[in-house]
């Protein structure tokens, strides 16, 4: 318990610019109705690009801003919230959530939060064939992301009892941003 409190306190001062970027983009509605454009089961789910191509988006500071990487924060398991980038100091609006330990990303991506509820739902959904699903962020606040999942191949999923009869599935995840505890 004491170790986790110490880590939380160090996170509060380790990524303030990144947390401010995510919180402000969320407040502006920037992430609302955007798609998770990259879903790799047992690795990551990535979003935050309004073009849904993996090449779009920008920060509140301009096109990009610098990394806030610290050796104390690691991608040790599922639920780590980090900035996606195209190399050092190229953070914009895109972020990812880890679905498993991803230590090879340590030192390359700024960690700025953690999912603390409903991560199991996301992991299970991302385990299905991602070509059959569209994952949308319906609304995003600083602390909660509401997802809507739209099913392409609904009939086969219903017949196999993987989904109830509704073509849309809604769920949310609660986030803790590092300097917004």
Image (tube, helix red, strand yellow):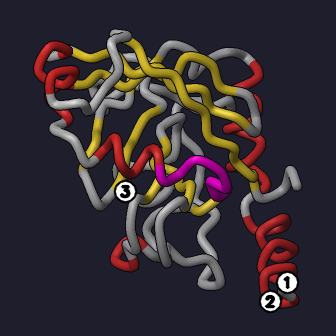
- Residue located at (46% from left, 45% from top): 121
Q: Which residues are magenta?
A: 113-120
| Spatial separation of the CA atoms under disc 2 and disc 1 | 5 Å
Q: Quadrant of the N terminus?
A: bottom right
Residue under label 1, please give it: 6
Mark 1: few/some/many CA within 10 Å (<14, 14-19, 20+): few
Q: At which x and y percent is residue 50?
A: 44, 18
Front-lying residue, 7 or 127: 127
- State the residue in front, 166 or 138: 166
Asked if residue 65 can be seen in this view, the reply is: yes
Callout 2 touching callout 3 (CB < 8 Å): no
Is the residue under label 1 in contact with that under label 3 (CB below 8 Å)? no
Q: Which mark is residue 87?
A: 3
The residue tagged 2 is 3
Secondary structure of the magenta portion, mostly? Answer: strand
Q: CA distance from mark 2 to mark 3?
A: 31 Å
Residue at the spot x=75%, y=52% of the render? 176
Disc 2 and disc 1 in contact, CB within 8 angstroms: yes
- Choose top left, top right, bottom left or bottom right for residue 62: top right
Q: Residue at x 26, y 17 (%)?
A: 151
Residue 90 visible from this viewpoint: no
x and y percentages locating residue 26 in the rendered image: 69, 26
55 to 9, vertically: above or below: above
CA separation, marks 3 and 1? 29 Å
User: Residue 84, image x and y in percent?
Assistant: 43, 49
């Amino acid at each position: 318990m004491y170790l986790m409190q110490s880590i939380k306190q160090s996170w509060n001062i380790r990524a303030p610019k990144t947390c401010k970027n995510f919180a402000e983009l969320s407040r502006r509605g920037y992430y609302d109705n955007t798609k998770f454009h990259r879903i790799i089961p047992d690795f990551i789910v990535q979003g935050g690009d309004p073009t849904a191509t993996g090449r779009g988006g920008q920060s509140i500071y301009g096109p990009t801003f610098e990394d806030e990487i610290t050796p104390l924060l690691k991608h040790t398991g599922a639920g780590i919230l980090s900035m996606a980038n195209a190399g050092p100091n190229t953070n914009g609006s895109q972020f990812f959530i880890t679905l498993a330990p991803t230590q090879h990303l340590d030192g390359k991506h700024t960690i700025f939060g953690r999912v603390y509820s409903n991560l199991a739902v996301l992991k299970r959904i991302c385990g299905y064939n991602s070509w059959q699903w569209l994952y949308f962020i319906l609304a995003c606040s600083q602390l909660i992301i509401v997802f809507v999942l739209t099913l392409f191949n609904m009939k086969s999923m219903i017949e196999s009892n993987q989904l109830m009869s509704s073509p849309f599935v809604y769920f949310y995840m609660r986030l803790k941003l590092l300097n917004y505890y």
